[in-house]
Image (cartoon, rainbow, N blue to C red):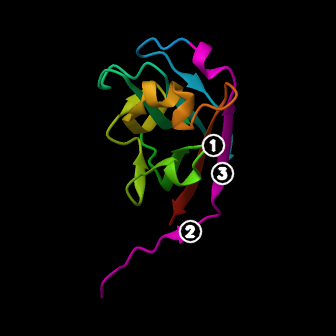
Amino acid sequence: HVMKSVWEESPCEAIQWHIHNFAKIPSERGVPIWSDPVFIENSQFCLELFPGGMTSSSDGFVALVMKKSHCLVQELFHADFNISICNHLRPEDTVKKLAPKDTTFPGPMGKDGREARVGWSDFMKLADLLNPSHGFLHLGKIIIEAQITPRVW
């Protein structure tokens, strides 16, 4: 008799984050800004954008991660998620990154106190994000979208 794990799919939660006056936000390495939190399966999540990158980022890249707050010591949270930076001029050029299926929080980025982050330290180049002709920055604003689907037993 073989026991088989079956994941149930919970409803997808979406985050849409409008960042106004983006070009005026300091781009110091390691300094993030945060979206408003959403609550999923009794857990608090937000997006965390590092305009100047994380300490592990390549020079000139922004980092973008999903952050789970209030992590308990032994707690693991499994989810599928993606994050996009929208292109206003050419929607087909939106930069979208998908986390590996059944991503675990905390993941490879580990935990910082009671917070776990999973995402990309080199999401895209800051220069591309700031250049209005590239279509991401429009009227001083960028839009970041994310979908997260928790996986429960």
Q: Residue at x 52, y 46 (%)?
A: 83
Residue 9, numbered circle: 2
Q: Is residue 129 left or right of residue 86?
A: left
Q: Say which residue label 1 marks.
A: 88
**What is the quadrant of residue 2 in the picture?**
bottom left
Residue 14, numbered circle: 3
Distance from disc 2 to disc 3, alpha carbons, whole Å, reads: 15 Å
The region drawn magenta spans 1-25
**What is the quadrant of residue 18 in the picture?**
top right
Question: Furthest residue to the bottom?
Answer: 1
User: Dot 2: within a 10 Å radius of its alpha carbon, few (fewer than 14), some, or many (20 or more) residues?
Assistant: few
User: Dot 1: within a 10 Å radius of its alpha carbon, few (fewer than 14), some, or many (20 or more) residues?
Assistant: some
Q: What amino acid is found at the position of numbered circle 1 in the picture?
A: His
Q: Is residue 108 above or below residue 129?
A: below
Distance from disc 1 to disc 3, alpha carbons, whole Å, reads: 19 Å
Q: What amino acid is found at the position of numbered circle 2 in the picture?
A: Glu
Residue 153: % across, % down: 50, 66
Q: Mark 1 or mark 3: which comes first in sequence?
A: 3
Q: Is residue 144 magenta?
A: no
Instruction: Tell me the quarter of the image containing the N terminus.
Output: bottom left
Residue 66, numbered circle: none
Task: Name the element at disc 2.
Answer: strand
Residue 131: % across, % down: 51, 27
Task: Name the element at disc 1.
Answer: loop
Q: What amino acid is found at the position of numbered circle 3 in the picture?
A: Ala
